[in-house]
Image (spheres, helix red, strand yellow):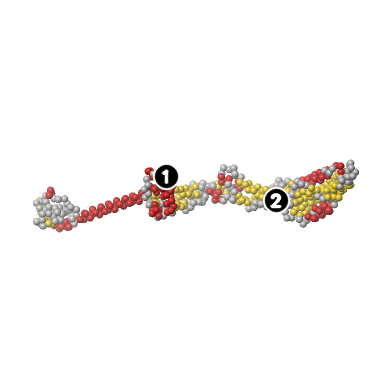
Amino acid sequence: MKFCAQCGAKNEDEAAFCQSCGQPLGGAETQVLHPSMLEAYNQSAQSDATSMPEPMLNSTPVQMQVGNQSDIPKKGLSKKMKIIIGIIAAICVVVGVGGYIAYNNIKKRVDVNKYVEVQISGYNEAGKAEIKLNKSDFYHAILKAQGYNLKKMADADISRLERKVADSLADCGFAMQLDKESHISNGESVKLMINIPVTVKQKMGITLVSKESSYKVDGLDQAKLIDPFEYVSVDFDGVSPKVKVKLSNTATNSDDSFLKKLSFTADKTSNIASGDKITVRVKTDEPEALENGYRFNQTEKQYECNKVDEYVQKISDISDSNLDVLKKDAKDKVTSYITGINSDYGVTYSDLQYEGVYFLKQNSGNNNYACVVYSANVSAKPRTNSSYRTFSATKVYFPVYMSGILIKGNGSITHDSSLSIRGTTSLRYGNSSSLSGYTSGETMYNEIIKNNKSKYTCEVIGNISSFGG
């Protein structure tokens, strides 16, 4: 029995080649092996082993022929080795294909976060968060992922493709949003969320990736505390109780655009009486003020209507000094009336005296008038023409009518400029002119006061009250 020196397989003595590996067996020197190694060689031959165990020491040797090395053909691959090599080759193919696919996927992947930032501006408690997308770089990254070589393209073509990318993203529903966009304070966090629908990959052939990002807010300035009513003028105009209020912004020449546009409103703008209080409110809301860096220390304020022209409602509204003004106006009217009569008629007066005041206030409105009464002894003695009428000295009451009596905002008194003397006497002068006024106090009272009590609230002061009150 021969053993192959190449693979250790057992062969018949007459065999010229190894029946296992084809190695030549004849005409070769022998190798001595211990008989106990035969089994090992058999096992090695069955398992295609290529190495032999070393001979055991102190054992009876066995001779084995070894063929001439120059005559030995090259060794062929075993079946197992071929399988192993096939598996390795398959793995290499899979790895290569997978690597290629992964490389392509990486090339077609765009990280959205690289092109987005969140900007926080404004003032503490009124901060604003805004998403800023670098559209140009973002669109270019998408186009490159789609395989376009932008360096070799004209600007017009790139612009067209950018518009196409924008339209495709919109059609797919790509969107970005913040969990909070306004009224932001220092210390808060703002989260950026990016919605990437699966249709993006289907429609555009690329993969967009993103992650939720959080931005900590810090460094917003504090708003300035101001009194908004420092920038408003409240003017009452008109005659009480029909005063109107006018509100004006006093910061119109300011360089601050927000202060220039401050607006105000009043709870009552007309039919205001002296002493009434109105409430003025800031029309500009506080959130808008905060956005512009201001905080209001108050948003409404009361103003009292005073120092406006006011119709006299009763005689007690007329101070002594203002009554003296009315008395002087009435006295001047009487003297100018008498002295204005043609001197040829010989009408003269003496003992001019203040007698009192009739005051009438309209019940259904604010119209008022007063008759300031003076008396004088009047006579008519023509100097040149005996045909002129004459009358002896007679006491005549001259009620000087004045209407629209006002107490001005500065406290002074005024009235309509037109003055007249009420009443007509039976006294004649000149050819046949009647002297104005009354010779009877009772008649004067009846015509001025009594006949008007249904329409007016009437008051009487002075000596004339003896004729009726």
Front in this rendered view, residue 66 or 36: 66
Q: Is residue 48 left or right of residue 146?
A: left
Give the x, y percent position of residue 388: 88, 45
Circle count? 2
Front in this rendered view, residue 75 or 422: 422
Circle 1: residue type: Ala
Q: Is residue 218 left or right of residue 39?
A: right
Quarter of the figure with the N terminus: bottom left
Q: Residues within 10 Å of mark 1 (few under 14, many from 20)?
A: few
SS label for mark 2: strand
Give the x, y percent position of residue 348: 86, 44
Residue 350 is at least partly visible in this image: no
Quadrant location of residue 383? Answer: top right
Front in this rendered view, residue 375 or 66: 375
Q: Is residue 124 left or right of residue 213?
A: right
In the image, residue 157 above or below residue 57: above
Residue located at (68% from left, 50% from top): 243
Q: Point out the tag, 2 or 1, that comes first from the N-terminus.
A: 1
Circle 2: residue type: Ser
Quarter of the figure with the C terminus: bottom right
Q: Residues within 10 Å of mark 2 (few under 14, many from 20)?
A: many
Give the x, y percent position of residue 203: 39, 53
Q: CA distance from mark 2 to mark 1?
A: 73 Å
Q: From the image, tell me which residue sits under label 1.
A: 156
SS label for mark 1: helix
Residue located at (80% from left, 48% from top): 421
Residue 455 is at least partly visible in this image: yes
Residue located at (65% from left, 51% from top): 269
Give the x, y percent position of residue 296: 57, 49
For residue 240, the mark is 2
Q: Which of label 2 and label 1 is nearer to you?
A: 1
Q: Is residue 366 left or right of residue 176?
A: right
